[in-house]
Image (cartoon, grey):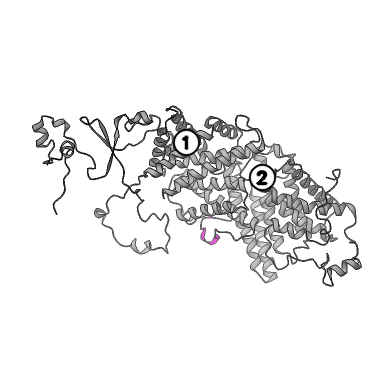
Amino acid sequence: MPIKLPACEPCRTSKQACDHSKPCSRCRERGSPSACLYRARPFKKRRLEQAGSDLLGFSNTDPPAALPNPLPETSHDSSEGLTIVETPEPSRGMPSYPNPGFLGSSSHTTFFEHIPRDTADSGQLPTYSADEEEIRNGANLIDHIHRYCHIGSCIALVQSWIAGGVNLALAGPLITTCAEVTQHVFSSYEMSTPSSFTPARSISQTLFTNSSQPLNAGDREDIAHWCTAFGIHNARWEILGLFFAALAAATSHTPKFEPLYRSHQAQRDLEKLAVRFSDRCLDISLSLDRLNDLQLLLQYENWISHSCLHGDQSYISWRKLGDVISSLYALGYHERVDPASPPLESFREVAFARAFSGDTNVSLFLGRPPRIDRKHCRWLPKQFQWSADAKVDYAAETQWSAICAVLKGEALDLFHVEDQAEKVRRANLIRNDADLQWASLPQHFRLETTLKECARPPKERDFLVSTLLNHLHVHFLLHLQLQTRVNDPGPELVAIAARMFSLAIESILLKDFLAYSGTTLDWKVAYYGLAAAGIICLSLLKQSPIAFDSGSLKAQMIQDLNVLVAVVETGVFIHPIDPNYALLSRATLTIKSLLRRLLSRDTRQPAPLTETDTLVQGPTAITPETWNIWDNQHLQDFEVDFWLNLAEHPFLIETPTESLPTSQV
């Protein structure tokens, strides 16, 4: 079959034969050899647009100078006064197949890696080019961000939040660069004609082009050099997504910022808007099928945003965490880390450690099995050597949380050990490991005084609280697994629960002297505080004479329960629109009923059942002595169901909705 050759534009438009030379014979005969032009892609479809299309809002040849944008190839026919624009392929350029990320020893590639390849036949991999619909959707997002977000004030809020010494736990070192890129992107939008839609389209096309390129950051020496891989002139969708994740966190932890909001409702509205924009940027990034470290950071911070906005009990938060874990497995960070620069390797290790501890803690909170199996995590050690001058920062908090998560997982495994002697033996080993790790911590990492007496900056105070709560929670789970009857907790478990709960309550009272160090205050109260409060309530109901070391312990527990009821009901700590309000309000309702009974009469001598009560309840009526609903169950969490079941205790069921007098609260 003869090869089809293109015709020059004058011959093609006049429908005359062309000899395909440059210039062709017909153009030489016309005396206009300079007009003999050939299209770059002559056999692709094209569309014609008037040269004055820039009057409609955009120009095909003059993109905004602020964001350099690769343009379609064009050719000009001076005789017709038209601009011929070569459009991309009708269908989107797909990524090379396969795009698998990390493939382990059991994958199909194990066999083909032993077959030599002929590099001469490998060819060039196809590149990605976003289609018109994708660019238009991206432009709509840019336009909505510009319309509904005052970018200058949002950047000021993020910068003010960071100036307080806090930041995102994982992507914190990049947020300053993200803010600069975001400001640069939208300043180019504002410099264009307000009625024009083209600036948004140009920005969208640039973001798609840059986001489809690899980061090429493996040889960077430090974070500053790594940021240059996606700096101002390499804006990506991931960068915008990380900025809005930082905006959501800054909004959540800044009660008032008058340029943007004054009320708690307005604060929540801005947080929701920031999370929504972060979602859109993440969806666009993932649609490119170019999984990389930057997308992993965005996935993690986006999960944290949803956790703060909706709570960890919401399905969307649970699914977002699963997406983070899937990306970690796809990148192979559970098994090995590719040779890279120290900052990049550190980022990957911290990302996996935070996801691992988050998966363990959320699984405990919800009573669900974890999704990261420790036996597949080769590099995750249970022991860690701390330097005496280690800094109190997010990396240290991450390392300690991961160590405690490993110990918590081992404590939960005791549930499957049926032999009691073997269970006690393993529990002692885990307890020794936990105590050894606590003793190896630098002195300035341990909270050994009351929180009020701790003269440290707010961020370090919060870090010390998280460190101690994590350590106590390991011992809490160990003693919980060793209980033969959960509704009859032993004195050691009660003492640990009382200490955990007291620290959580003290954190609420001194919340203005704490700053975000990786875990939010409402998470500390819901995760650690409610678990401890549940054991305390069970011990107060049982009233065993050996449950309390002294009368002062019982008095302190009752006082702390009163404080929790007060701060929840008055809205000092949490608002009805906050994600954990339903859980805390259900718990405080049951706690109020318990406190009212404790303060009104002696609980050790319950009123005898009347004849009417016996007739109504029957011979199998449940009494405080026979009430035992949690035996033979794997009790891991203290979520809503726990407090619903506790409210059915015979001692509390008579008046579950009665309130404490104000003077007693």
Q: Position of residue 64 (x, y in %)?
A: 38, 30
Q: Residues within 10 Å of mark 2 (few under 14, many from 20)?
A: some
- The residue segment tinted magenta is 370-384
Name the foreground residue: 610 vs 283.
610
Q: Picture coordinates of residue 53 (x, y %)? A: 33, 31
Q: Is residue 274 on the magenta stretch?
A: no
User: Disc 2 vs disc 1: which is toward the camera?
Assistant: 1
Mark 2–mark 1 Cα distance, whole angstroms, equals 30 Å
| Image quadrant in which the N terminus is located | bottom left
The quadrant of the picture occupied by the C terminus is top right
Tell me which corner region of the image, top left, top right, bottom left or bottom right, holds residue 164. top right
| Res. 249 visible in picture | no
Dominant SS in magenta: loop
Task: Name the residue beneath numbered marker 2.
Answer: 578
Disc 2 element: loop
Residue at (70% x, 53% y) in the render: 472
Q: Residue at x 75, y 56 (%)?
A: 534
